[in-house]
Image (spheres, rainbow, N blue to C red):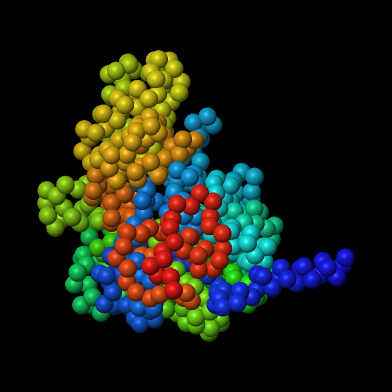
Amino acid sequence: MRIRLSLFLALLSALFTYPAAGQPPPPRLVVVITIDQFPYEYLVRFGPWFGAGGFRRLMAGGANFTHASYKHAITLTGPGHAVILSGSYGNQNGIVGNSWYDIDAHAPVYCVEDTTAKIVGAAGPGRSPANFIGSTYGDELRITTGFRSKVIAISHKDRAAILTGGKLANAAYWIADSSFVTSTYYMDALPGWVRAFNSSGAVNDYFGRFWHSRVPQEAFLGTDADDVPYETGGAGLGRTFPHPITGGNSRAITSSFYDAVLTSPYGNEILASFAKAALRGEQLGRRGVTDLLAVSFSSNDYVGHAFGPQSREALDMSVATDSIIADFLSFLDAELGAGSYIVALTSDHGVSPTPEYLLRQRPGTDAGRVPSDSISARCEAALNARWGTPPSGLRWIERMIDRNIYFRRAVLQELRAAPEEAARVAAGALARLRGIAAAYTRGQIETGAPRSPLDEKVKRSYHPLRSGDLMFVLKPYFLQGSAPRGASHGEPYPYSAHVPLIIMGAGVTPGWFAIDTSPADLAATLSALTGIEFTAQGEGRVLTEALR
């Protein structure tokens, strides 16, 4: 009996280690690189200043899908990262925003919060993928290989690492001040290689440095001026090069220093160094089975919010990222061998042009900012006119989060207003507010037949247990908020939805493919390339155009 069991286990091991006759060997490692806030047009606009080994290598040696766009309405970090390796949108995976509101608990819910977990390596609220519904490519990889494959996800942001890693990942790591941390969902103590990285001073060593521009002056011909009032220049960086990496105190490290270092190319350098340590520390790609390493660079997002997509900083940050990716690909070649791994590049969302930049170029342009107070005030006034003023101290709207409006149930009951009818009244009022493109009630989303691509995108960003009574979409080139500086994203338009999607490696046919695709197609394509089961609830397709 023991001999038969041993033989069975040996055959099972061989099944997961050796390819079938005539089939190429499986890749040693799948690497998925996500650049937070990186629209596809950066590859074109900043392309002349890239080197040969980064983005150009990927575009020339891989399948470059030039028309990849998200098909949901709320283009934010949480929803985007949840799509990338699940192939599903918020209507399926439940990640409808970075946060939503629990109307029964009267409390906001962060997309990766978990009160049953604790942070390992620092203090802070618990984090895990508990709110994510379904599975990711990494989850299916682990299941198919009998949990022999390792899945490691890393980022500056907790939600970026956790949502690409999935529910069955070995670990997700993110940064807290000078240390990379994880959660008790994954482990009770940090591995030795992580502790060694944290104690090396890799983050604090950047204190006192300057972010100098690395591109020639002629590269700035198509960018905005170096000092404009609608840049934030936060964390002590200032609005002009060179930017000091000290934070608010030039003599001592404070929490603002960590904001400064992450809002610079140095943040991406740190993450790339940690990714190299992860590959070596976990022996990824060296154990006779396919592993997954998901790396999400967040510093581009911090720079984009602070300076805007037309800024010199956005250009310089992109060129620096190109160099970092080139170095990382060379590292993979040296460690694993060129051609023995698959690498995919994408982004969670793009970014809107800064309204003040557009207005500076062409006064009178239909662009601007919609203050949150004006949105709630317009709704409150319409509801008051229809049903009367709520009892003293109460308002109709209990919370507004990520384009969702949640009504206060006590007020609806007191004034005998049905939620759907109240939502219709508020939607009608919002439709007349400058900067609002459309507003949808729950009933319209749940039962109405989509009449436009926008309707379909809104449906994909709606989940009945998490979305509000009312959802709204801003017009193109409008941002939510009142402060006249900084850039953002979140709308369904190409500038926020059109992102890179490039796959390079064994089994992939290089070329440029101008076909309608989405980052939701990545998980299914990786499954086809590696013989792994498709993800639960994934709606993406296999990009057969690029498969050999």
- Residue at (71%, 68%) from the top-left corner? 12
- Can residue 547 be seen here? yes
Residue 179, x across and y down, in percent: 57, 64
The quadrant of the picture occupied by the C terminus is bottom left
Image position of 467 with respect to 418: above or below:
below
Residue 306, x across and y down, in percent: 33, 58
- Residue at (28%, 61%) from the top-left corner? 309
Q: Quadrant of residue 474?
A: top left
Residue 533, x across and y down, in percent: 56, 59
Image position of 4 with respect to 398: above or below:
below
Considering every residue shown, the one lying at the far left of the view is 363
Q: Quadrant of residue 416?
A: top left
The quadrant of the picture occupied by the N terminus is bottom right
Q: Quadrant of residue 289?
A: bottom right
- Residue at (25%, 69%) from the top-left corner? 45
Query: Foreground residue, 116 or 247?
Result: 116
- Can residue 281 be seen here? no
190 left or right of 264 in image: right
254 left or right of 218 in image: right
- Residue at (76%, 68%) from the top-left corner? 9
Image position of 185 with respect to 419: above or below:
below
